[in-house]
Structure formats: C-alpha cells, structure tokens
Amino acid sequence: MIFTRASIEAKHMTLLYSGLTLVLGLILIWMSRSQPFPEHSQNFGLLLSILGALGFLAHQAERDVGPTIEPLIITLLGGIGVIVGLIHVVRTRMDVLIAPSSGLLLTVGAISLFAKEWQNLTNFEQISSFVLISILILLNIYLVFRTLLIGKLPLAWSQSGLRQLRRGVIFGERGAISCFEKAWDVDEEHLNAMAYSALYLIHSHFGNEKDTEIWNQRLLELGGKESVDNAWIIEIEEALSNIEPQ
C-alpha cells in the first residue's frame, strides 16, 4: 500500500495524540495515590489510558483516522473533564488533578482544530481564534496554579479518614490516622479541631498514651472537645466501637 504525504502526517498526529493521552492517563493514575479519594482521578486516568491505547491501535490500521476526529474527541473530553474537575475543586473538594489535566487536553485539542482550519479562516476569524486560544492557555495556567500549587483538601482528608475508620483501616499509609494527620488548614481551624479530636479518640482507643497526650494538647489549644460539633465526636466513637483495640 502506498502512503501519501498527507496520510503519513495524519498517522504521525494520531501517534502524537495517542501518546499524549496515554502518558497523561498514566500520570493521573500514579498521582492519584496522593489524593484522599484516589478513585476519581484514577478512573479518569484509566479512561485516558484506554483511549490512548485505542489510538495506538488506530495508528496501525491501514485506513487513516479522520484528521479532526482525535482532536475533536480530546477537546470534548477535556471540556467535560474541566467541568467535572472544577466541581470537585470548588464543591466536593475531593480532587485537584482532573481539572488541570483536562485543561491541557482542551487546550491541545482546540489548538489542533484551529490549526487545521487556519488557512481557510478570514483575518477576523484568525484573530478571534488566536484570542480564544490565548484565553484557554491562561485559564489552564490558572487551573494549575489554583489546584496543584495552592489546592488544599483538608475536608476531604477528614472524610477519607472517617471512611477508612469505618472500614477498620487504621494504620499504614492509607489508614485513618494518616488521613487525619493531613486534614489540617491554616485558614480553617475548625477542620484542625475535627482532625485533632479524631486522632485523640483513635489513639486513646488503642491505648497509645504518648500520642493521646500530644493530640489532646493540640485539641486543647483550639478549645478542646467543646470546639467540635458533637455529631462528629459521635461518628468517630461509633466507628471505633466496632474496632477491637490491639
């Protein structure tokens, strides 16, 4: 079969898009381990990895993939991912990885789509496209700064700690103690009190006198157990009641 220059370029672009999607998916899966709820970014990373693998299969096919199919797919996927990621950042506060990674896909996909039609656009359309692309790049830089650099998940770490406590997973890197130790925030001291009270109750339950005293002292500095909603204390105590002290 004779490949034209256009088909060779199309296959190279397919390989580039597939490589970007696959690498980004693998990075998300790897980085998800540092999240309080790793399943969100892990599932999104798995989706990207599958799409990247399918792209490599398409690269081996004799029939070329349409020049706008792959950039259109990653643009749509990036747009949806940005919306979902921002919901997690602003509302649920459970994930800070989906939004910036999706922003990268959205930006790359949009640039590719505009580049393919650039010669057919009028001067006004070219200027408008350039402005739109610049806005997308700036927004993606903001997403990276807002999430990866200053994004904090203290509430999510407390929620994850409570989930692990109910499961009976107390110790270890993903245990309840580790989660509650990360659930602090300089600007939201009530979250600190929640985490300190949970750590105090857990260590007290297991008879760790030294750690119990340490976390009790930190809790007292914030007003003691009276500074924490009683419903939170009840939740921790009920979860601990189902766990036998070691």
Image (spheres, grey):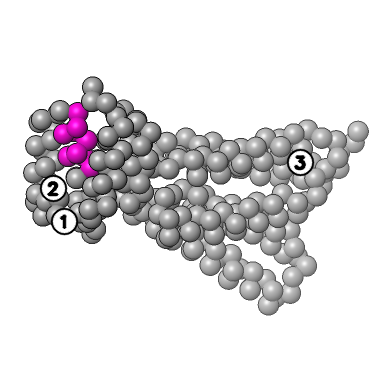
Q: CA distance from mark 2 to mark 1?
A: 9 Å
Looking at this view, name the residue that lies furthest to the top. Answer: 246
Q: Amino acid at mark 2?
A: Leu
Q: Amino acid at mark 1?
A: Ser
The label nearer to you, 2 versus 1, is: 1
Per the image, the residue denoted by label 2 is 219
Residue 11 disc label: 3
Q: Nearer the viewer, residue 186 or 148?
A: 186
Report x, y in % for residue 36. Answer: 38, 42
Report x, y in % for residue 110. Answer: 64, 59
The residue positioned 13% from the left and 35% from the top of the image is: 212
Query: Do residues under tags 2 and 1 come within 8 Å of each other at their CB atoms?
Result: yes
Callout 2: 10 Å neighbours few (<14), some, many (20+)?
many
Q: CA distance from mark 3 to mark 1?
A: 62 Å
204 within the magenta span: yes
- Whichever of callouts 3 and 1 sits on the residue coming sooner in the sequence is 3
- Vertical arrangement, residue 30 with respect to residue 224, above or below: above
The residue positioned 70% from the left and 55% from the top of the image is: 72
Residue 118 vs residue 233: left or right? right
- Whichever of callouts 2 and 1 sits on the residue coming sooner in the sequence is 2
The label nearer to you, 3 versus 1, is: 1
Examine the image and state in which quarter residue 17 appears.
Answer: top right
Residue 198 vs residue 61: left or right? left
The residue positioned 19% from the left and 32% from the top of the image is: 205
Q: CA distance from mark 3 to mark 2?
A: 61 Å
Per the image, the residue denoted by label 1 is 227
Callout 1: 10 Å neighbours few (<14), some, many (20+)?
some
